[in-house]
Image (cartoon, rainbow, N blue to C red):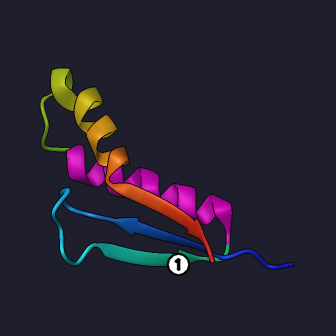
């Protein structure tokens, strides 16, 4: 059976129009999430980066559709 994954990624907790993407492959989804989080935190100072990455991951939801 084919599984499809839907990722919803908000810019912040009150984002009315979060980014929604659908993936057929788990690995493809993980690669996109990793690169998107990295893109969003690239401007953050190194000492703050880990905590900002943790915040970014809380803005994600993954659902099997």
Placement of the C terminus among the 4 image quadrants: bottom right
The quarter of the displayed image where residue 35 is located: bottom left
The quarter of the displayed image where residue 2 is located: bottom right
Q: Assess whether residue 27 is covered by the magenta stretch.
A: yes
- Is residue 26 rendered to the left or right of residue 41? right
Q: Is residue 32 visible?
A: no
Q: Residue at x 13, y 43 (%)?
A: 43
Q: Residue at x 29, y 47 (%)?
A: 56
- Is residue 61 rendered to the left or right of residue 40? right
Q: Residue furthest top?
A: 47
Q: Which residue position holds label 1?
A: 22
User: How many numbered dots are placed on residues in this image?
Assistant: 1
Position of residue 26 relative to residue 38, above or below, is below
Q: Assess whether residue 32 is covered by the magenta stretch.
A: yes
Magenta: main secondary structure: helix
Q: Residue at x 15, y 63 (%)?
A: 14
Q: Nearer the viewer, residue 4 or 65?
A: 65
Residue interval drawn in magenta: 25-41
Q: Residue at x 87, y 78 (%)?
A: 1
- Is residue 14 rendered to the left or right of residue 33? left
Q: Residue furthest right?
A: 1
Q: Position of residue 23 (x, y in %)?
A: 58, 75
Q: Position of residue 21 (x, y in %)?
A: 45, 77
Q: Position of residue 49 (x, y in %)?
A: 23, 31
Position of residue 3 relative to residue 37, above or below, is below
Q: Nearer the viewer, residue 13 or 26?
A: 13
Q: Nearer the viewer, residue 14 or 7?
A: 14
């Amino acid at each position: 059976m084919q599984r499809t994954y839907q990722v919803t990624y908000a810019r912040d907790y009150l984002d009315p129009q979060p980014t929604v993407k659908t993936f057929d492959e788990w690995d493809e989804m993980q690669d996109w999430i990793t690169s998107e989080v990295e893109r969003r935190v690239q401007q953050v100072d190194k000492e703050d980066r880990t905590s900002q990455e943790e915040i970014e991951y809380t803005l994600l939801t993954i659902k099997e559709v």
